[in-house]
Image: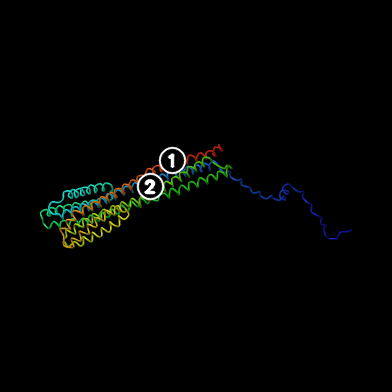
Amino acid sequence: MTQPTGSAATAPAPVAPPTAQNAMAATPSPLPVQATATPKPRDTPRELRRLTTLVIVAGLVFGVTGLATFLLLTSALQRAESSTAQLIRVQQIQTNLLRADANATNAFLVGGLENADQRKAYDDAITQSSQLIAEAADAEPGDQAALSALNVQLIDYTENIELARANNRQGFPVGAQYLRNASGGLRADAMPILDNLVTSNADRAESQMNARIAILFAVVGLVVLGLLVWVQVGLARRFKRRFNVGLVVASAVGAVTLIVGLITLGWTAATIGTIRDGSFTDVRDAATARIEGNNAKSNESLTLIARGSGGSFEEAWKASAAVVEDRISRFGRDVEVVWQPYVDVHTQIRTLDDGGQWDKAVALATTQSNTAFTAFDTNVAREVDSASAETTGGLAATVPWMVIGAILSLVAGIAMAVLGRRGLAQRLKEYR
């Protein structure tokens, strides 16, 4: 067959043989392979060292907390004992001053030379008051300013009493005015100072008996025990062992110390509560009864000295008698029985004086009244001494237990730290 004229014949282009470069270009690129991160091995020794430090610190915190708790309670109880002793001193000063005034006013009724026994009782009361003021100032620096002012009032009182005596011996009526000035100044200026001191020392003693720092020991102890249990559970899971002897013993030491410590603190709190509501209250009530009793006895004499114009003194006697009857009600019949005879004699005195028989009233006031009142005063003084000794003795008896608790708590804390460290050291040896 003939090809068409004028057209060139087209032959297929030759195919080049494949080269290595072309083969590489034709081969598809493989996908990049992502590198898988290998987990970082746990540094068990380091973790054990950290747990060891944590356990040691926890044990020492437990011990120091127990030490601080018991020592702070010891200090609070010692301060409460000191404040109670100061309260007793101040109330004794009150009693002595009013007892001195009762003797001075009663002796004034006789006129001329006073009874030697009454004079001695007056002098003894004033001397004791001066000594107690000095002792109280040394015992409590915070009371020194008030006691210094009280000492000035005591000097003024004794000076007026001496002027009253001097004029009374010579039969001068002005002596009665000096006596009233002395008694009035004692009640208006000296007694308010003593009342404030009584209140401040009583409040201080009660606040120190209400220390509640024991709750800190309980909270810290429970936290430390919880931490030790947490560490033991973690070790058991990691090392497939049920118990770690060191940590178990450390936990047992902490638990026993915590329980015994809380029992001791609870016993101490109950003991202090009994003292606060019992003998400490008895001290205040018995001393107040004695103070107001002497105040009443003094006002009885002042009523007679006023000769018909002593209504205010009789009202003061009634107010004091009401306080006495209220305070002695907690001491039972023994004290109430010795108070009533004095009240009966006083009623007779008022009947005689109001009936115009002043001389007979004075005679009764300087004999039977004194005898009946002395019986009451002696009885109440015995109650004051007994309650005072019971209060201070009870507070002092708890102090040694607090010291023992402080020492044992510190020793237990150190033991817990040592035992916990040994327990973790056993696991740490496995990596050496």
Depicted 256 relative to depicted 150: above or below:
above
How many numbered marks, from 0 up? Answer: 2
Judge the density around disc 1: few (<14), some (14-19), many (≥20) Cα neighbours within 10 Å.
some
Q: Quadrant of the C terminus?
A: top right
Q: Nearer the viewer, residue 365 or 94?
A: 365
**Does residue 145 appear anywhere in the picture?**
no
Q: Which residue is mark 2?
A: 73
Depicted 428 relative to depicted 100: above or below:
above
Name the residue at 45% across, 45% down: 260
Judge the density around disc 2: few (<14), some (14-19), many (≥20) Cα neighbours within 10 Å.
many
**Dot 2: what SS?**
helix
**Lateral position of residue 78 relative to residue 34, left or right:** left
Residue 2 x/y as whole percent: 88, 59
**Lateral position of residue 30 relative to residue 394, left or right:** right
Q: Nearer the viewer, residue 335 or 273?
A: 335
Q: Earlier in the sequence, mark 1 or mark 2?
A: 2
The amino acid type of the residue labelled 2 equals Leu
Name the residue at 39% across, 43% down: 401
**Does residue 267 appear anywhere in the picture?**
yes
Residue 302 x/y as whole percent: 19, 58
Residue 149 x/y as whole percent: 22, 52
Q: Nearer the viewer, residue 359 or 389?
A: 359
Residue 308 x/y as whole percent: 17, 62
Q: CA distance from mark 1 to mark 2?
A: 18 Å
For residue 170, the mark is none
Q: Which residue is mark 1?
A: 411
Depicted 350 relative to depicted 404: above or below:
below
**Dot 1: what SS?**
helix
The amino acid type of the residue labelled 1 equals Val
**Lateral position of residue 187 relative to residue 257, left or right:** left
